[in-house]
Amino acid sequence: MHPALGGQETRNGLVAAVFEVRPIGVLHTPWHSTSECPRNGRRADPPPLCTAELLPEYLDGLHSIEGYSHLILLYWLDRATAPEMIFTPRNSDQPRGTFATRTPRRPNPIGLSVVKFEGLDEQRRLRVRYLDCVDGTPLIDIKPYLRTTDSEPEASMGFQTNRTS
């Protein structure tokens, strides 16, 4: 039993539960299909201005966000196809495990982008750059990017070490 989850059953020490994730808003981008999206939001040149529109009940959560230059946006990749645990990425000639890649085809298709934050517009939508998702993607969380915590300059890149972008 897992006390933090109301005593739910565990399987091999892992919680065997289904979690509910509720969107807090929606992301607006210029891309209307997954085939139009850049593989990485930093590849779009120039990076388009996108917006994150929060549901009214979450707008108060934006209090004090104005001082940050970058944010982390978490979103649900609702158009992702079924997960594959091993597949050959389009930029590779070798099979790779899902968790060694950034594929949207995951057991929980959660997307993450570090975006440049350019302030709030008149409707209190976040103005951001460097998103890489389809217009209408559900937003599930926003966190401030902290260079002292979120940057690892010495991080290794695994099989992608020789890639330039």
Image (cartoon, rainbow, N blue to C red):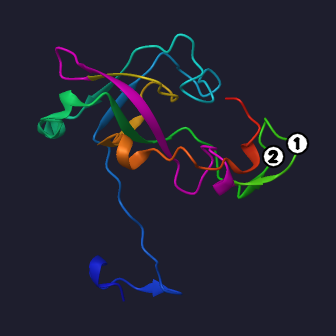
Please state which of residues 40 and 134 is positioned toward the viewer in this rendering: 40
Q: Is residue 91 left or right of residue 108?
A: right
Q: Which residue is mark 2?
A: 88
Quadrant where the N terminus sits is bottom left
Mark 1 vs mark 2: in front: 1
Quadrant for residue 17, please give it: bottom left
CA neighbours of label 1 inside 10 A, class few (<14), some (14 to 19), many (20+): few
Give the farthest residue toward the right.
93
Left or right: 142 in relation to 30:
left
Q: Is residue 7 above or below residue 84?
A: below
Residue 102, horizontal then vertical, whole percent: 62, 44
The residue at the point 63 percent across, 47 percent down is: 105
Tell me, yes or no, whether the two marked residues, 1 and 2, touch with CB atoms within 8 Å. Answer: yes
Whether residue 52 is in magenta: the answer is no
The residues colored magenta run 98-125
Residue 88 screen position, x and y as percent: 81, 46
Extreme residue toward the front, this view: 154
The residue that disc 1 covers is: 93
Label 2 Cα neighbours within 10 Å, binned few <14 / some 14-19 / many ≥20: few
Label 1 sits on a secondary structure element that is loop
Quadrant in which the C terminus appears = top right
Residue that sits furthest to the top in the current view: 46
Residue at screen point 24% across, 23% down: 125
